Image (tube, rainbow, N blue to C red):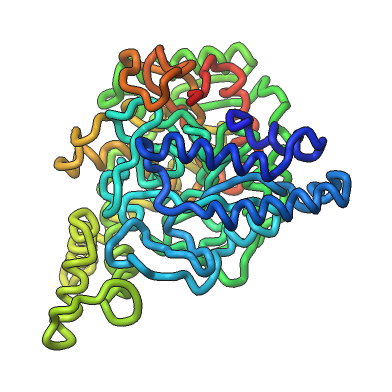
Amino acid sequence: MQHLTLKELQKKLRGGETTAVEAAQKVFTQIQKHEPVVKAYLQTFEKDALEQAQKADELLRSTNGAAADKQPLLGIPLAIKDNMNLLNTETTCASKILKGYISPYTATAVQKLQAAGAVIVGKTNLDEFAMGSSTENSAFQQTTNPWDRARVPGGSSGGAAAAVAADECFGCLGSDTGGSIRQPASFCGVVGLKPTYGLVSRYGLVAFASSLDQIGPLAKTVADAALILNVIAGYDEQDSTSVKQPVKDYTEFLDRDIKGQKIAVIKELLGDGIDDAVRQTIQTALDGLRKQGAIIEEIAMPSFKYALAAYYLVATSEASANLARFDGVRFGHRSKNARDMLELFKKSRAEGFGAEVKRRIMLGTYALSAGYYDAYYLKAQKVRTVIKQDYNKAFARYDAVLSPTSPSVAFKFGEKVNDPLSMYLSDIATIPVNLAGLPGISVPCGTAGDAVSGTVGDAVSGATGGLPVGLQLVAGEFAEQKLLQIAAAVERGSRFERIRL
């Protein structure tokens, strides 16, 4: 049962073919079996989850399955990334500075999952404060890629992607500031969706970069991601960046063909810096789209060469401001060896934050400092505007733009962790999407590279041909229905098989 998709489990629960308790038990069996190696979770809630599942079964039985019409995720085991608040549970952001912090409330997106009947099974690992592309920056543990234990799962939502890939949940909420949903989805062979900025409430998400952060789903299939988006999308008055948009059914067009749809391939993201094997896999996926009637053309996006620099000025500047609240006084870690208040601030932050977080705080503080604001932060915001304008020009002619999600397949542990620039380049294709506030999705479209060795499971189907490659699609603001329709076509046209552990 653990290998079912969310949609398949939903159907079986409604039809009485299985129970929510059985589904939850299967998930926890999978967690018990694989977590010693995968280490996707920072905490699990087996007792509470089984109680939630029992209540879901009672409701399904008493209504002959009709309750699922009002609660579409009733009895579905899901997880959340550990930078989202869940009442009376620890929220650490994988940082020592928040170890022991107990959430006094629940994030809006998580509340919506609960209201839809989802069973929350645990909170997943991440790069500290969502700052990283490999989950190697977690202060607590190293999550491995279920396809190959010697490789990273991506980041910062690496725990979420690994949990979904290893069938340790049926879907997970992640956050995406510069690719943190899509890049790990690509590395782990799952679907990762970053919605339009403002479509999903950020209330209760611990802020990294407030103008870039967005919550979205990681799931086994495009349909599963759409089902979760149906639940979490919508206006929230508690989030000042939330946008009032009509509620849509994001599953509505998934089965429609894409004949006549115009898709632009970004020239700069299929050239230098992209691994040959990844490029070839994307080209094969393009052939599959052409066979389904899509019109594929190449376009240039010259502003993209400035995106990485602009992002790491905007994101670090906002991070330095947001993380100033972690001062050792109000919550989180407090140094025990401080003689006065200033020393308390210094020691608490020095002891609590990891190296990458410190690096970004210093970069951002410098960029915002007197005499440098105009030269760095303001200029980066102007570049951001140009990137958004380039996207708008593309969407005046095309339904979506396409690229690899990442320049490479999952890399090995230690390969880039001591080379920040090389690590930052992992997100070169995803970062422009966040700067423009657009919806983007990563869909597995095939495998590339050498045959996998050292997989987590004893018998792995679909893993012998290499590592997963993700194809990224981007659409205009609030065009998630169109985006998901084309993504479903990518899924249909690929020969990709999910890993089975």
**Up/down of 439 relative to 321, above or below:** above
Q: Is residue 303 visible?
A: no
**In-image side of 126 versus 86 (left or right):** left
Q: In which image quadrant can residue 340 be found?
A: bottom left
- At 49% from the left edge and 32% from the top edge, which residue is drawn? 190
Q: Kindly tell me whether residue 242 is visible in this rendering.
A: yes
Q: Position of residue 131 (x, y in %)?
A: 31, 52
Residue 76 in percent (x, y) is at 66, 45
Viewer-nearest residue: 352 or 48: 48
Determine whether, in the image, residue 143 is placed left or right of residue 220.
left
Which residue reaches farthest bottom? 340
Residue at image location 37% in from the left, 44% down from the top: 431
Q: How many marks?
A: 0
Q: Residue at x 23, y 34 (%)?
A: 413
Query: In the figure, 305 relative to 464: above or below?
Result: below
- From the viewer's perspective, tell me whether residue 249 is left or right of residue 501: right
Place residue 200 in its image quadrant.
bottom right
Residue drawn at the location 18% of the way across and 78% of the way down: 336
Residue 238 at x, y percent in the picture: 58, 72
Quadrant for the N terminus in the image: top right
Residue 376 drawn at (x, y percent): 22, 59
